[in-house]
Amino acid sequence: LERLDDLRVEVARQREMKWLDMFCHWDKWVKHRFQKVKLRCRKGIPSSLRSKAWQLLSDSQKLLEENPGKFEELEREPGEAKWLDIIEKDLHRQFPFHEMFAARGGHGQQDLYRILKAYTVYRPDEGYCQAQAPVAAVLLMHMPAEQAFWCLVQICEKYLPGYYSAGLEAIQLDGEIFFSLLRRTCPMAYRHLKKFKIDPILYMTEWFMCIFSRTLPWASVLRVWDMFFCEGVKIIFRVGLVLLKQMLGSVEKLRELQGMYETMERLRNISPDTIREDVLVFENGRVCVLTFIMNLTLYLQSVFFLFFFCTVRFMRASNGTETMPV
């Protein structure tokens, strides 16, 4: 057992060394060996280096360096009262059992307030969306307030543009896309949700907008975020598809879900046993491959029909039954 522990420590140390080497030559790795970076993110970023990795992957470090003193400047602005009141009320709801946010008015809640207020000043046209609070809280667990702010900016503007705007048009559009993908990847789950008229917006809003921070076991949340910062919004789609497949993808699983209420309860209260970290990553890869195969199939079908159409027209033209266009 002791030797096994020593082996795990050595493996963890080797992974850290690999990431430190990537940090030293980051631009080259991203430009020439991005597939390797992606693979290492899927394996999970070492916890000691996660803060640095997220900032590099999201380019938020670049924003921080390009805007020295900007965060403090935003903090000094008074802000709009209507947003500040809502933010104040939301602070105690973010991970209340985490030591960083447990105390009312404590250091964690103060930093969370600073970040969310600064964003309303930075983007007054967008203001504040309640789903931003858990996202900012996760960032604060890994980095100081200023770095977390710029990371939040990148999430809102680079990764999930329009998700936190009034009206939620972007999330509704992505809901339609998500449902279309579900139809292809897991028809059984699709038919069940369609049968009970369960619109994607009813369950995927919290999943997507909070990047699963309120949905999955913590180890899985971190693995999803590692992949998300590397590969973008498609990770959220894939994880959502995996969750629905795990919960609604077989006759046995659907037997106890006899209506809309039971189904929504299952979707809103996902059992930790439903999706483990290793299963999540494995199934994510399968969904990726399946989506690629479907896209390739559609492409080959279109090429075949185009070839068939041109061949028929050519034969007709040769037989004098159709005039080929000049």
Image (cartoon, rainbow, N blue to C red):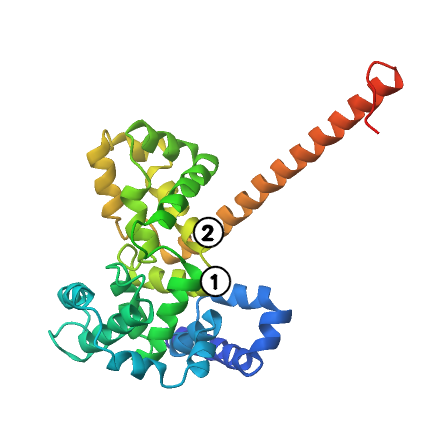
Q: Nearer the viewer, residue 152 or 284?
A: 152
At horizontal 40% and vertical 39% (from top left) the residue drawn is 179
Amino acid type, mark 2: Asn
Residue 309: quarter of image: top right
At horizontal 35% and vertical 60% (from top left) the residue drawn is 220
Residue 4: quarter of image: bottom left
| Secondary element at image label 2 | helix
Amino acid type, mark 1: Arg
Give whichever of discs 2 and 1 has the lower sequence position: 1
Residue 223 in the image: x percent, y percent? 40, 63
Q: Nearer the viewer, residue 102 or 126?
A: 126
Read off the residue under disc 1. 42
| Secondary element at image label 1 | helix
The residue positioned farthest toward the bottom in the image shown: 69
The residue positioned farthest toward the left in the image shown: 104
Q: Nearer the viewer, residue 184 or 205?
A: 205
Crowdedness of circle 1 by 10 Å Cα count: few (<14), some, many (20+)?
many
**Which quadrant does the N terminus fall into?**
bottom left
The numbered disc on residue 213 is none
At horizontal 39% and vertical 32% (from top left) the residue drawn is 188
The numbered disc on residue 284 is 2
Q: Are marks 2 and 1 in contact (CB under 8 Å)?
A: yes
Residue 184 in the image: x percent, y percent? 48, 36
Left or right for 199, reference 65: left
Residue 36 in the image: x percent, y percent? 58, 67
- What distance separates the C-alpha of mark 2 from that of mark 1? 10 Å
**Which quadrant does the C terminus fall into?**
top right
Left or right for 138, reference 157: left
